[in-house]
Image (cartoon, helix red, strand yellow):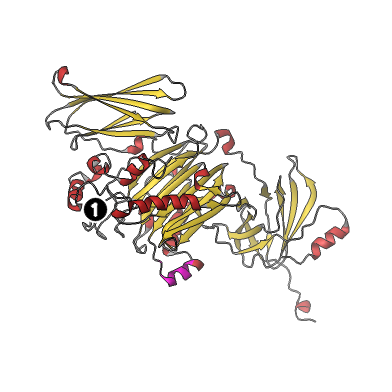
C-alpha cells in the first residue's frame, strides 16, 4: 500500500496493491497538527471488486479533505483485506510522517507498481502509444513518442504498440499506402530501427493505423499472427470509426492489440457503447475463430471519445480553469478529482455497460482533448475530456501464470501536432516460467549457412522436429538488418512435390530435375532428439546481388515464423574466365 498526498489540492490518494482480494476496507485518519484527539476525523471506504483482473491489480480511490494552509498533517491509513479464497483478514498499516505544506510530493502512479527497470526473466514488457493525429503528417522526429531517456538496451521494452487515429485517408493516400509505408509508419521505422526493432505487422483501415514492433530476438518465436478490422462509421459502411486489431502468440501466451476510434460528440454515449459491443462480437482470428476476449492478454487503446458526464453543468471554461490552477507537473486524475468523477468511461466500466473485465490505471495526466493546434491551451469550443485511453485485460485473474503489471500511464506534452495529446503506457506481462523462457522448442532450425554463391544453385539444410513442411510454406530472403517482416527481397513457396527420403540414385536424379525454384528433399539423417534433416535447393535467381542476408521460414498453416537463419554473405564465384566457351570457340 502506498500513500500520495498533495497539499495544494487537499487530496489524499491511497493505492492498494493486493493479491486475490475481493473485499478491501481502508480507513484513513487525519488531523490538523496540535489538535486534540477528539477532533481527529476518520474516513472509511469499503471497496468490493469482483474478479480483479490481475494478481497485481491496483484498487485505487481518492479522498478529499480540507485543512488550513498553515497546518501540518499527520496521516495514518489502515487497509483491511479479506482473501476471497481463504476468507481470512489481513491488515496492512501505512503511516505518513508529519509533513509541512511547503513540501510537495508529486503523484506518480508508476512507482506504486514497479521500479523503473527491466522486467524479470519470464516477463515481457509492452510499450503502448495512442495518438489521434487529426490528419496531420509527422513533421517532427518521433523520438518524443519513445519516453525511454537514459535506458540501456536491456531495459527497452520487448514490444511496441502504436495506435493512430484520423490518419489522412484521401483516395491517393490509400493507393500509395497499399504499396509503401504510410508517413507515420515510415517515421516510426526510422526511429525504431536505431533500437534494433522489427515491424511485425501494420493493420490499416481508412483513418485507423496499428503498428506492432518487437525486438529482433523475438521474431523466431512469433506464432499465429492474424489481423482483423471492424467498421462502425456510417452504419458500418465506412471505416473512419471502428477498430483494427492484431493477434499473435509468443512463448505460449496469446496477445491481442486493439486500436479503436469510437463515435464522437458528447451526446453519442450510447453509440460509443454500441461501438465496443459491435467490435467484440464481430472480430475473430484464424481458423480457430478466436475472439478478442479469448486471449491471455488484451491491450485496448485509441481515441475512445468518452467525454465528461454532460448532466454535470461545467463549462469548457470552468474545466480549463481548474486544470490550469494546478501545477502542470501535478495535473492528473487525482489532483483533478472533481473533474475525473465525471468521466464517462469510468462510469460505463463500473456499471458493466462496456469493457467488462478490463481495467485501467489512474491517468497520470490531464484531459488530452481538445487543444489548440501547436499550443498547450485548450480549445474551448469543446469541453476538455480524457478521450485517449489505454485499457488492459487478462483472461483469468485467478491464474497465477497470467500476471500483468502497469508501470506507467502518462501523456506526452511536447508533441503538439494535433488537437489531441499522445498517451503512453508501459506494462509487464508474465508469459512463462523462468526456466522455460530460454528453452522454447523450435519446430524448424536453419543449419548454419557458410557460403552462398551468386549465379548458381545453392543448398541449405533444415532441422525439423514434429513438423511437416506444407506446400504453401514460404521462405523469404531479407537483408541482415531487416526492419520489417514485409521487407523480403525475394521469396519462394515450397513446391507441391516433395521428395520422401530414399537412397536410390533415381531419387537423387529426380530431385535434381525438379523444375521448382525451391526443391525439398528429406534426408536419411535423424538427430538424437528425433528431428530430421531436410535439404532445400534454391535456384540462382533467389539472391541476385552481393551482400549480407538472412532467410526466414514462414508457415502458411498458422501464419507463424518458424525459423530465422544466421546471417550469411552472398558472393560471386571466383573462377578463371573460359573465353572459348564464352564466345563459342
Q: Is residue 173 magenta?
A: yes
* CA neighbours of label 1 inside 10 A, class few (<14), some (14 to 19), many (20+): many
Numbered range of the magenta stretch: 169-177
Q: Please provide percent x and percent y for residue 204.
A: 47, 60
- The residue tagged 1 is 383
Q: Please provide percent x and percent y for residue 68.
A: 12, 31
Residue 471 as seen in the image, left or right of residue 283: right
Q: Quadrant of residue 136?
A: bottom left
> Mainly helix, strand or loop, the magenta region?
helix
Q: Nearer the viewer, residue 253 or 416?
A: 253
- Residue 428 seen in the current view: yes
Residue 52 as seen in the image, left or right of residue 334: right
Q: Is 231 placed above or below 252 here?
A: below
Q: Please provide percent x and percent y for residue 393.
A: 45, 41
Q: Nearer the viewer, residue 219 or 542?
A: 219
Residue at the image point whose x is 73% and y is 44% from the top: 531
Quadrant containing the N terminus is top left
Q: Secondary structure at mark 1?
A: loop
- Residue 148 seen in the current view: no
Amino acid at each position: 500500500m502506498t500513500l500520495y498526498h498533495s497539499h495544494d489540492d487537499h487530496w489524499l490518494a491511497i493505492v492498494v496493491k493486493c493479491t486475490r482480494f475481493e473485499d478491501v476496507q481502508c480507513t484513513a485518519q487525519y488531523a490538523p497538527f496540535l489538535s486534540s484527539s477528539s477532533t481527529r476525523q476518520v474516513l472509511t471506504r469499503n471497496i468490493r471488486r469482483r474478479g480483479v483482473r490481475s494478481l497485481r491489480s491496483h484498487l485505487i480511490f481518492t479522498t478529499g479533505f480540507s485543512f488550513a494552509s498553515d497546518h501540518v498533517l499527520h496521516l495514518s491509513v489502515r487497509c483491511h483485506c479479506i482473501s476471497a479464497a481463504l476468507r481470512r483478514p489481513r491488515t496492512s498499516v501505512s503511516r505518513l510522517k508529519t509533513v509541512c505544506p511547503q513540501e510537495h510530493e508529486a503523484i506518480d502512479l508508476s512507482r506504486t507498481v514497479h521500479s523503473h527497470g527491466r522486467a524479470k526473466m519470464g516477463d515481457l514488457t509492452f510499450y503502448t502509444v495512442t495518438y489521434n493525429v487529426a490528419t496531420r503528417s509527422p513533421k517532427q522526429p518521433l523520438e518524443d513518442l519513445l519516453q525511454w531517456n537514459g535506458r540501456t538496451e536491456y531495459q527497452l521494452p520487448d514490444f511496441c504498440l502504436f495506435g493512430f487515429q484520423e490518419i489522412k485517408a484521401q483516395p491517393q493516400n490509400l493507393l500509395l499506402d497499399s504499396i509503401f509505408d504510410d508517413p507515420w509508419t515510415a517515421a516510426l521505422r526510422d526511429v525504431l530501427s536505431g533500437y534494433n526493432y522489427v515491424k511485425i505487422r501494420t493493420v490499416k483501415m481508412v483513418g485507423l493505423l496499428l503498428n506492432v514492433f518487437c525486438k529482433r530476438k523475438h521474431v523466431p518465436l512469433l506464432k499465429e499472427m492474424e489481423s482483423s478490422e471492424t467498421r462502425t462509421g456510417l452504419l458500418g459502411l465506412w471505416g473512419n470509426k471502428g477498430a483494427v486489431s492484431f493477434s499473435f502468440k509468443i512463448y505460449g501466451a496469446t496477445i491481442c492489440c486493439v486500436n479503436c476510434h469510437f463515435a464522437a460528440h458528447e451526446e453519442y454515449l450510447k453509440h460509443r457503447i454500441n461501438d465496443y459491443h459491435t467490435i467484440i462480437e464481430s472480430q475473430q482470428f484464424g481458423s480457430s475463430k478466436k475472439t478478442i476476449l479469448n486471449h491471455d492478454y488484451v491491450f485496448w487503446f485509441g481515441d475512445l471519445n468518452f467525454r465528461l458526464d454532460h448532466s454535470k453543468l461545467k463549462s469548457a471554461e470552468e474545466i480549463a480553469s481548474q486544470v490550469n490552477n494546478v501545477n502542470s507537473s501535478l495535473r492528473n486524475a487525482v489532483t483533478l478529482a472533481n473533474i475525473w468523477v465525471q468521466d464517462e468511461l469510468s462510469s460505463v466500466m463500473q456499471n458493466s455497460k462496456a469493457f467488462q473485465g478490463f481495467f485501467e490505471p489512474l491517468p497520470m495526466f490531464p484531459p488530452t482533448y481538445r487543444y489548440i493546434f501547436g499550443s498547450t491551451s485548450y480549445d474551448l469550443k469543446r469541453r476538455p475530456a480524457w478521450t485517449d485511453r489505454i485499457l488492459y485485460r487478462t483472461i483469468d485473474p485467478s491464474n497465477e501464470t497470467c500476471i500483468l503489471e502497469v508501470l506507467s500511464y502518462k501523456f506526452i506534452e511536447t508533441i503538439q501536432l494535433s488537437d489531441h495529446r499522445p498517451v503512453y503506457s508501459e506494462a509487464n506481462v508474465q508469459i512463462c516460467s523462468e526456466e522455460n523462457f530460454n528453452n522454447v522448442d523450435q519446430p524448424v532450425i536453419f543449419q548454419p549457412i557458410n557460403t552462398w554463391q551468386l549465379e548458381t544453385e545453392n543448398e541449405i539444410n533444415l532441422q525439423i522436429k514434429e513438423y511437416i513442411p506444407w506446400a504453401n510454406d514460404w521462405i523469404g530472403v531479407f537483408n541482415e538488418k531487416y526492419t520489417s517482416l514485409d521487407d523480403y527481397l525475394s521469396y519462394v513457396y515450397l513446391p507441391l512435390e516433395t521428395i520422401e527420403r530414399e537412397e536410390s540414385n533415381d531419387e537423387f536424379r529426380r530431385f535434381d530435375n525438379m523444375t521448382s525454384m525451391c526443391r525439398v528433399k528429406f534426408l536419411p539423417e535423424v538427430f538424437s532428439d528425433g528431428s530430421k534433416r531436410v535439404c532445400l535447393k534454391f535456384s540462382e535467381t533467389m539472391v541476385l546481388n552481393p551482400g549480407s542476408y538472412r532467410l526466414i521460414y514462414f508457415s502458411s498453416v498458422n501464419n507463424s515464423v518458424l525459423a530465422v537463419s544466421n546471417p550469411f554473405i552472398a558472393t560471386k564465384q571466383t573462377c578463371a574466365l573460359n573465353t572459348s566457351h564464352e564466345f563459342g570457340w
